[in-house]
Structures are given as C-alpha cells and as structure tokens.
Image: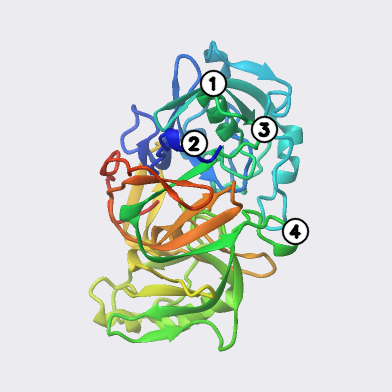
C-alpha cells in the first residue's frame, strides 16, 4: 500500500492568516482555511496531533466567558461557526461514533481537560468538507456541546491522530484499501524547509510516557543566546526534562516554574502580570516602560542598552538525540495580540509577551512556536516522528516519503506561501 500511495500527490495544508468574517476588517485568525456544508460555509481549522476525529463548533460554541468578552469575539476566535440548518448536505447522527467517527480519543494525563467526555457528550453527523484543495463529500464530524479545550486553543479541530477519520475519508476518495489501517501509507516533507541531519523516534501514546501526542523528547539543556555572543543555561547541571511535543498549543514551552524564573533572572526581566490575549492562560506579559524608571518594585534598568526596551536574544533547546533547535527572539517574545470587542485583531506597540508558562505537576510541553524553528514529520504507518532544524523560508517543495523512509518520485514544484502574511515576522 505504501508503494501504491506514491501514485497520489500529497495534500498541503498551510497555516496562515485567514480573515474569519469578510464584513469585519482585520478579523484574522491563524489556521487552515476550509469550507464545510452546502452551500459552503467558510471556517478556520487547526491540526491536532492527538485527536482522531474532526471537531466543528456550531451556533453554541461554548467559549470561556472569563476571557472571551462577547459573542463576536467568540465567533472570530473559533474561526466562524457552522450553521448545520443551512447545509443541505448535513446528515445528523446521535454522536460522532454513529456518524462513522473514531470511537475514542486519547485522554492521557496532560491532554485537554474535557477530552474524556468529548465523545460521550457531543453531537455528530456527516457533511462535505473542503480543505487543502481536496473535497471530502461525506466525512464524519463531531460537534462539541461542552467547553472541553481549556478555552485558549480556539479553532475548529482537524484530527490527525493515530486513527484520523479525515485520512480514512481521503482513502475512500482515492479508492485505497482500508484494511491496513487509516493512515495514508505515504507522508510528505518539504526539502526547502529543512536543514541539517534529522532525528527519528518511535511514537508512543502509552500512559507511562505521559505524552498524549506520542511525541516525547528529552531536553538536556536550554541556553539563552545573548547578542554579544554569550550563552547562559537556564537548566541546572546534569538535569534532563522530558517534554511532549503538542503542535496545536499556543506557546513555545511549558515547563516547571523554576526554569521560567531562571530565564527571568538570567535576562534580568520580570513578570508584571497575566495576559488575556490570543496567547492567554497564565502568560507573562512584557510591557514597554520608560527606561531606567522603576515600575512599582520592579526596575527595568537592564534594558537601557536596548533601543526597543525588550530582551532581544534567541533561545536554543538541546535534545538528548543531539538535535539543537535555536528559536529566534521574535518567535518567543512576541507583540501582544488580541481580538477586540468588534471582532478585529489588534497588535500592541507597547506590550510584548514571553511564550513560556510555568507548571507545577503537569507534563512539560514544546508547543506551536517550537515548530517555527523545528520541522516535524509524523509517519503513522511506521509509528515514528522525525525532527529537523527548520530552514526559515516561505517556499516549499513537497516530497512524498513512503513508510520505509524512501522518497517517491520528484518533488512538487516549489511554491511560495499560499497567501502572504500581514505580519511575516510573526506566528500567531
């Protein structure tokens, strides 16, 4: 099957800025543009590495009212809402399993709090889904009826887990044999976006690993890279931290609070409060203050030599596999972004945020912004995942990779990003 799959072209799903409501200026969310139903309704999706099913929000999107101030903000941050009554092709079922979806989702400790009840409490159905230029005419979807996702990972969820129903739908569309399982038999990577040697590890979803995406790595050191060429570690000597790679989550790194405190000490910066923007949930907020002027009991003297007023160094993660991933400063100390009450996305010129979060007893995670500097390929047939250092470019040339690791044929013609980003130096 893997060899036969080389006859099919890979589907590219670029994550980009998408205007959610054409009638609301700057109503952008960052995700995968898609269409659902007949006539087609525009939505924005985000891929989830652990979910088997695709989850779509309807007119009852269950946003967290403590951080989402009104219904318009909720609709924009969800990536628009699916109005099932307006779709002539929607076929309602009692739940996602009856609709032909996967009977279970991974609920390992550390996964989303409501995942255990997601299947049993949700509605289900089938409908047309257009994503990445491919039409799935009757694919199972689940419709959540409770707030299950902690309120910060907001967009419609495209499940790309070990048994993804969307890949099963692609198999049926292509007329492939389904007996060997739901994965595609062929993966894809883009040669322009990778550099250096890769590292391949086994996927492991077992409870004992504490990693619900199956992608666990061991971080042996984290170094802050100063502009003068000096590097300082923020991890104690002879310490290793196991981290679960969770691509859909909205930060760079969630780790024990002591590591975050050490970063602040090394960079002589402080945590002035909690953020409620698009990077919400206990984030540390970096504000622009007049230089050399104390703010409360916090002095920002350190920044007097930096014109911008913010720490401007990179950070490098060292993995036990030997891979080193250097994350640029503008991918982890980022401008404050929020959705205003009118639904427009705003960018602050006076505030920045550190995309770290301190944990107590939860598993440590490397998240979305880690993958702005590392390139990830997952092969469910071979039960492996592969990491490279990423090459920052907007161009790509997809190469199909069979389950034995061999490449299939010639790469697709190199193409730039599908739609230029309004803010090209940022990943929201």
On the rendered image, what quadrant is the N terminus found in? top right
Question: Alpha carbon of mark 1 to alpha carbon of mark 3: how far?
Answer: 34 Å
Q: Is residue 341 at least partly visible in the picture?
A: no
Q: Residue at x 47, y 31 (%)?
A: 80
Residue 207 circle label = 4
Outermost residue, left side: 307
Q: Residue at x 45, y 22 (%)?
A: 41
Q: Residues within 10 Å of mark 2 (few under 14, many from 20)?
A: many
Q: Residue at x 26, y 71 (%)?
A: 308
Select label 4 or label 1 by which is in front: 4
Q: Residue at x 25, y 82 (%)?
A: 305
Question: Alpha carbon of mark 2 to alpha carbon of mark 4: how far?
Answer: 32 Å
Q: Is residue 129 above or below residue 63?
A: above
Q: Label 4's element? A: helix
Q: Which corner quadrant of the image does residue 209 belong to?
A: bottom right
The front one of 88 and 51 is 51
Q: Are marks 2 and 3 in contact (CB under 8 Å)?
A: no
Outermost residue, bottom side: 237
Q: Label 3's element? A: loop
Find residue 345 and report its horizontal and vertical position in percent: 36, 43
Sequence-wise, which precedes: disc 1 or disc 2? 2
Q: Residues within 10 Å of mark 4 (few under 14, many from 20)?
A: few
Question: Alpha carbon of mark 3 to alpha carbon of mark 4: how far?
Answer: 27 Å
Sequence-wise, which precedes: disc 2 or disc 3? 2
Find residue 324 and report its horizontal and vertical position in percent: 43, 73
Dot 2 corresponds to which residue?
5
Dot 3 corresponds to which residue?
179
């Amino acid at each position: 099957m893997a060899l036969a799959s080389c006859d099919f072209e890979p589907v590219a799903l670029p994550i980009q800025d998408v205007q959610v409501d054409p009638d609301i200026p700057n109503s952008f969310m960052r995700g995968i543009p898609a269409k659902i139903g007949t006539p087609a309704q525009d939505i924005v999706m985000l891929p989830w590495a652990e979910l088997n099913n695709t989850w779509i929000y309807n007119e009852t999107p269950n946003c967290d009212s403590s951080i989402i101030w009104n219904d318009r903000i909720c609709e924009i941050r969800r990536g628009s809402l699916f109005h099932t009554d307006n779709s002539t092709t929607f076929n309602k079922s009692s739940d996602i399993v009856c609709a032909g979806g996967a009977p279970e989702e991974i609920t390992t400790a550390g996964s989303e709090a409501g995942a255990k009840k997601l299947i049993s409490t949700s509605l289900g159905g089938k409908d047309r889904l257009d994503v990445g230029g491919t039409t799935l005419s009757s694919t199972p979807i689940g419709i959540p009826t409770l707030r299950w996702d902690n309120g910060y990972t907001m967009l419609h969820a495209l499940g790309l887990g070990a048994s993804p129903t969307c890949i099963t739908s692609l198999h049926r569309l292509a007329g492939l044999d389904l007996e060997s399982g739901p994965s595609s038999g062929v993966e894809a990577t883009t040669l322009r976006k990778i550099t250096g040697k890769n590292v391949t590890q086994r996927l492991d979803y077992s409870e004992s690993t504490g990693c619900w995406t199956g992608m666990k790595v061991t971080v042996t050191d984290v170094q802050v890279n100063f502009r003068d060429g000096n590097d300082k570690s923020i991890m104690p000597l002879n310490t290793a931290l196991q981290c679960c790679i969770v691509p859909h989550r909205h930060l760079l790194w969630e780790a024990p609070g002591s590591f975050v405190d050490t970063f602040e000490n090394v960079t002589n910066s402080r945590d002035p409060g909690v953020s409620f923007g698009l990077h919400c949930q206990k984030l540390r907020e970096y504000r622009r203050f007049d230089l050399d002027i104390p703010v409360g009991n916090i002095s920002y003297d350190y920044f007097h030599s930096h014109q911008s007023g913010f720490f401007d160094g990179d950070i490098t993660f060292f993995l036990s596999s030997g891979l080193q991933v250097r994350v640029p400063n503008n991918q982890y100390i980022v401008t404050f972004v929020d959705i205003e009450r009118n639904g427009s996305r705003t960018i602050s010129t006076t505030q920045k945020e550190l995309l770290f979060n301190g944990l107590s007893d939860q598993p440590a995670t490397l998240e979305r912004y880690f993958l702005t500097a590392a390139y990830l390929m997952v092969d469910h047939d071979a039960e492996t995942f592969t990491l490279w250092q990423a090459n920052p470019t907007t161009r790509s040339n997809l190469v199909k990779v069979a389950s034995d690791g061999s490449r299939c044929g010639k790469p697709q013609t190199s193409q730039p990003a599908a739609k230029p980003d309004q803010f090209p130096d940022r990943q929201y």
